[in-house]
Amino acid sequence: MGKKPIIIGVAGGSGSGKTSVTKAIYEHFKGHSILMIEQDFYYKDQSHLPFEERLNTNYDHPLAFDNDYLIEHIQQLLNYEPIDKPVYNYKLYTRSDEVVRVEPKDVIILEGILILEDERLRDLMDIKLYVDTDADLRIIRRMLRDIKERGRSIDSVIEQYVTVVRPMHNQFVEPTKRYADIIIPEGGQNHVAIDLMVTKIQTILERKEIL
């Protein structure tokens, strides 16, 4: 049997700290054979829609993601083939013309709110993590991010959270917790859980080198 990259899925609600967990693991192995793939890069292309229609996109619904495209790219990486990862333009509400060249590595961290929702994605993962954080912390983090990075107003962030983010989290994101191998409370602040994951990944990598 030939060598195959391992895939670690990191899921959790918006603002849960899953990106912090992902980056902490990545930074530990930086310089080694590891890469990150964010599900956020794989929102569907909406260039065929008028701008007014794009404004209504529900980014917290499973149908917002082009999982077929994501799975195609993961399969290429599993075969040690490079990919051209798409880039999403949040101001135009569609996929941009830019791509990012990603070279294959031995460890792939797949991060996103709904990566455990699709059975096809789950089946590709060797380890499935769910970052579980209280709702009040998640909304504060999301508010700070959207205002700072995406130019949103406080009112628009709160309205979106109440009408879209919270109900979508309860309906689609939270239920995927049952698929996780490991649940990490409090995200990037949980250094014990991150250290355990780092040790586990190290063991898998060493075993792969032996095989």
Image: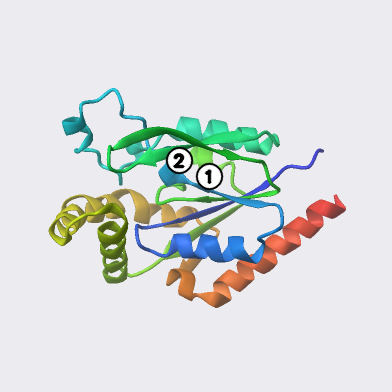
Q: Is residue 109 above or below residue 83?
A: below
Q: Which residue is disc 2 drawn over?
A: 118
Residue at 51% in and 64% down: 21
Horizontal and vertical percent position of residue 112: 44, 50
Say whether residue 188 is left or right of residue 51. right
> Marks 1 and 2: in contact by CB < 8 Å?
yes
Choose between 28 and 123: the one closer to the eye: 28
Residue at 25% in and 42% down: 58
- Kindly give the residue lying farthest to the top in the view shown: 48
Say which element carries label 1: helix
Residue 82 lies in what quarter of the image?
A: top right
- How crowded pointer 2 is (Cα within 10 Å; few <14, some 14-19, many 20+) is rated as few
Horizontal and vertical percent position of residue 139: 26, 64
Q: Which residue is disc 1 drawn over?
A: 122
Horizontal and vertical percent position of residue 52: 16, 32
Say whether residue 76 is left or right of residue 150. right
Residue at 70% in and 37% down: 80
Say which element carries label 2: loop
Residue at 20% in and 57% down: 157
